[in-house]
Image (cartoon, grey):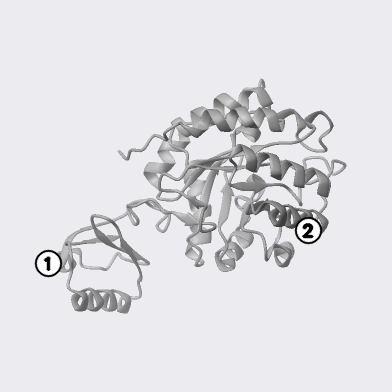
Amino acid sequence: MIVILRKNPEQRQLENLIQWLKSLNLDVHLSVGETSIILGLIGDTSSVDIDLIRALDIVEDVKRVQEPYKNANRKFHPDDTIIEITADVKIGGGNKVMMAGPCSVESIDQICEVARRVKAAGAEILRGGAFKPRTSPYAFQGLGETGINYLLEAKKQTGLPIVTELMNISQLPLFDEIDIIQIGARNMQNYDLLKEMGHCGKPVLLKRGLANTLEELLMSAEYIMANGNQRVMLCERGIRTFETAMRNTLDLAAVPLLKDLSHLPVIVDPSHATGIAKLVKPMAMAAIAAGADGLIIEVHNDPPHALCDGAQSLTPEAFDVVAACVKNLIPLSFHW
């Protein structure tokens, strides 16, 4: 349920209303927007007298929210969420952000070289995998803690904040200096891990599972937010369909739809979505045109010899071109 307040409510009346609603065993989320103030009520609202609330002087309207996700719902938070990573890097609300780097950290020279190159091209965030979930148990699994240390050295040399994937709770102590924690597609419904992300306080990049609906993605975000962390980004990285020409099918329609359903930033991963390096540029441009708040792109200094996902990785030179192409694109901005 949401309570829409009239403009400039009297502070004492607002405080009394919130206190009364909390006395009904409801959690009250205050959202102050540019044009309105909204109280989001979470809990059992079946016995709440809507007419009684609507009759209050400071109340404009009261509406029930049917969707199962509350915190992530745009009805609860009409304005776009803007997540501040550093003083200069903000995600959401029209801030177009590029995250770039190798699928896997392979050596300190490799990650530092790629970090310098993507920063020069305009990337604001360095991506790189230290822990890698792989379909085959015999495939390269990442460097683990050593990979984290290499990422931190690249951050020290370039100043780029880092996004990297966390696979289980036991690894969390290694992520103290990591700026954004990525929850990968395979862990999108790892609810214990999602709950822990709610307690960690760090920005979270939540990737859509390869066979999950948008509602399931939003419910996974709800797990994080309901446990106290509102700094969540949604990532469309392609879904599994009957098509075999590409690694996955990039669901571009999900971008504007997610932006309409939720206030959370939406990031698109054209690398995993297609699995083909030459498709990254057109899909990156299409994603921004569809309204994405940013891109996460795989860049490797030697893709043919990459230990992981070389076929979808751009060379630094190719990333220069992609970055230049998306730089001046204006994301679509509308809500139905």
Which quadrant, please, contains the N terminus? bottom left
The disc placed on residue 55 is 1
Quarter where residue 324 is shown: top right
Vertical side of 93 occupied by 248: above or below? above
Amino acid at circle 2: Asn
Residue 109, image x, y percentages: 82, 46
Measure the C-alpha gap from mark 1 to mark 2. Answer: 59 Å
Residue 268, image x, y percentages: 55, 38
Identity of the residue drawn at 85% across and 41% down: 139
Q: Secondary structure at mark 1?
A: loop
Asked whether 211 or 128 is in front, the reply is 128
The disc placed on residue 73 is none
Amino acid at circle 1: Ala
Q: How many marks?
A: 2
Q: Which residue is mark 2?
A: 149
Direction from residue 88 to residue 111 in the image, left or right: right
Instruction: Categorize mark 1 by other alpha carbons within 10 Å: few (<14), some (14-19), many (20+).
Output: few
In the displayed orientation, state which residue is furthest to the right: 138
